[in-house]
């Protein structure tokens, strides 16, 4: 009885935000919002409060403010903090930083262990309570491109798709093929159900948006040596091969608010291949607010154990997705992959696998009923690096970790939300028909 009472008190505190921290685990506060801080060269700095943070890699003197980090967390004074062990100078009008905290990995592991020991039924109620109370860093009704797809590289400043091109509504395969295989900058609006009859090429400078009720069945898109593509609010169902195949030096692709499924009844597609492949020196991809369900092999990043030329490529951001599939969320070889604020929901085989010296950062995710949340090395593939921090494990195993991976903030600014509220938010926001398709396409209805 006493143990149950203590667990209930702990969960109530978590739900109310009383235990929320104003700096990430393993970070040390260096100054408060509005003050000036100084750090050594190439130092990862977090800005935020209440377990929600924007990250940036900085050098020298900077202002601890929204203008520096690209956002702030409402409801109180934000703090600037740095990873433990980094060197800093005293801030202006602020005391020097406190003594270094324990390492990020140790603190994160302790936090995850404490959370995973709580009974699953009580944790579910805590999630619902905290989600209602927490502020949100991203607007799920019409979020903007972010992550690697928004980062400059290969001559592009960001991903804009077909913005500025003509908008076309399409309802049959013949017209769709003509449009997607064109070199014209286009905004393509999918109207109704189209039988893809396999993989259809999709060229550069395209935005593809599904209108209400739109669905692409029995196939998907192959994106080969292309760039600058946006796919939003599209329901992909029942592809016998891949649903999205992005390969051969493709870069800057944003997939947002889509649904991927084999159909309404599992396991229809056990013999099917993966839903989503990113291979062969492809890079700067973001997959956000999407729902993956009724499938086994979900997302492969890296073609094979022998494809070492992928090293330095395959830079991918995966956030606010709902994974109700068996495995590969993702399975990574060689690439740099940032996995944050996703909901892993009853994955039968495993959550994430970092293999073949991949660098994977896993933070702020919620794992529910996942026996193996993360592997380093899998099957015949050798191990990769995996860093985990601030993940919630409900009725789940532990995450394997290895090495130091990489720093996502060295590429782009981002905010990690309190993972306790992720299931409620993701279930309500991920997948098709959660955003206005016309606003997502950037055109007036016609």
Image (cartoon, rainbow, N blue to C red):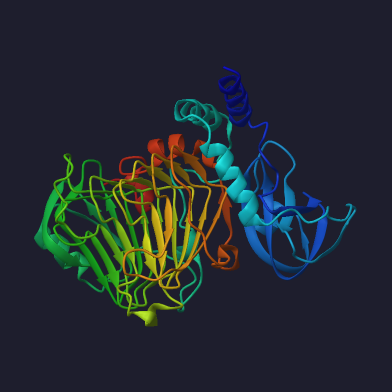
Image coords of residue 241 (percent x, y) = 16, 62
The quarter of the image holding the N terminus is top right
Return the residue nearer the eye: 414 or 361: 361
In the rendered view, does 194 fall on the left or right side of 65? Answer: left
Residue farthest top in this picture: 1
**Residue at 31% in and 53% down:** 327
Return the residue nearer the eye: 377 or 302: 377
Quarter of the rendering containing residue 247: bottom left
In the rendered view, does 193 fall on the left or right side of 102? Answer: left
Image coords of residue 188 (percent x, y) = 25, 58
**Residue at 49% in and 71% down:** 157
In the rendered view, does 365 fall on the left or right side of 86? Answer: left
| Residue 223, placed above or below residue 325 | below
Total residue callouts: 0
| Residue 77, placed above or below residue 384 | above
Image coords of residue 43 (percent x, y) = 70, 67
Inspect this view and state whether residue 396 appears. yes
Image coords of residue 220 (percent x, y) = 19, 60
Return the residue nearer the eye: 374 or 446: 374
Inspect this view and state whether residue 186 appears. no
| Residue 302, placed above or below residue 211 | below
**Residue at 82% in and 54% down:** 99
Quarter of the rendering containing residue 44: bottom right
Return the residue nearer the eye: 8 or 268: 8
């Amino acid at each position: 009885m006493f143990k149950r009472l203590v667990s209930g008190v702990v969960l109530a505190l978590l739900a109310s935000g009383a235990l929320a921290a104003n700096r990430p685990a393993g970070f040390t506060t260096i100054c408060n919002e509005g003050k000036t801080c100084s750090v050594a060269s190439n130092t990862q700095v977090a800005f935020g409060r209440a377990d929600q943070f924007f990250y940036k890699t900085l050098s020298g003197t900077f202002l601890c403010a929204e203008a520096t980090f690209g956002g702030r967390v409402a409801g109180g004074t934000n703090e600037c903090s740095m990873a433990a062990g980094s060197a800093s100078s005293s801030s202006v009008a602020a005391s020097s930083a406190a003594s270094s905290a324990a390492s990020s990995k140790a603190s994160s592991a302790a936090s995850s262990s404490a959370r995973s020991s709580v009974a699953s039924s009580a944790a579910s109620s805590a999630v619902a309570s905290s989600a209602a109370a927490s502020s949100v860093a991203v607007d799920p009704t019409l979020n903007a491109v972010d992550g690697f797809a928004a980062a400059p590289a290969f001559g592009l400043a960001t991903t804009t798709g077909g913005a500025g091109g003509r908008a076309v509504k399409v309802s049959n395969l013949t017209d769709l093929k003509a449009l997607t295989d064109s070199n014209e900058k286009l905004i393509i609006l999918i109207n109704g159900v189209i039988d893809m009859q396999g993989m259809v090429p999709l060229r550069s400078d395209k935005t593809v948006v599904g209108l209400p009720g739109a669905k692409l069945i029995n196939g998907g898109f192959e994106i080969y040596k292309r760039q600058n593509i946006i796919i939003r609010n599209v329901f992909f169902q029942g592809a016998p091969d891949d649903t999205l195949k992005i390969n051969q030096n493709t870069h800057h692709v944003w997939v947002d608010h889509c649904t991927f499924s084999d159909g309404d009844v599992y396991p229809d597609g056990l013999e099917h291949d993966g839903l989503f492949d990113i291979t062969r020196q492809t890079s700067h991809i973001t997959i956000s607010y999407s729902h993956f369900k009724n499938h086994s092999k979900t997302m492969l990043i890296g073609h094979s154990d022998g494809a070492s030329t992928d090293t330095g490529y395959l830079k991918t951001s995966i956030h606010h997705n709902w994974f109700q599939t068996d495995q590969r969320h993702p399975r990574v070889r060689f690439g740099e992959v940032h996995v944050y604020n996703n909901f892993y929901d009853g994955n039968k085989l495993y959550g994430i696998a970092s293999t073949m010296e991949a660098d994977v950062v896993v933070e702020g995710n919620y794992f529910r009923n996942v026996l193996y949340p993360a592997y380093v090395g899998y099957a015949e593939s050798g191990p990769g690096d995996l860093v985990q921090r601030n993940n919630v494990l409900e009725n789940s195993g532990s995450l394997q970790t290895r090495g130091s991976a990489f720093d996502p903030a060295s590429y782009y600014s981002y905010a990690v939300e309190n993972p306790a509220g992720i299931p409620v938010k993701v279930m309500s926001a991920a997948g098709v028909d959660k955003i206005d398709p016309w606003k997502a396409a950037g055109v007036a209805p016609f």
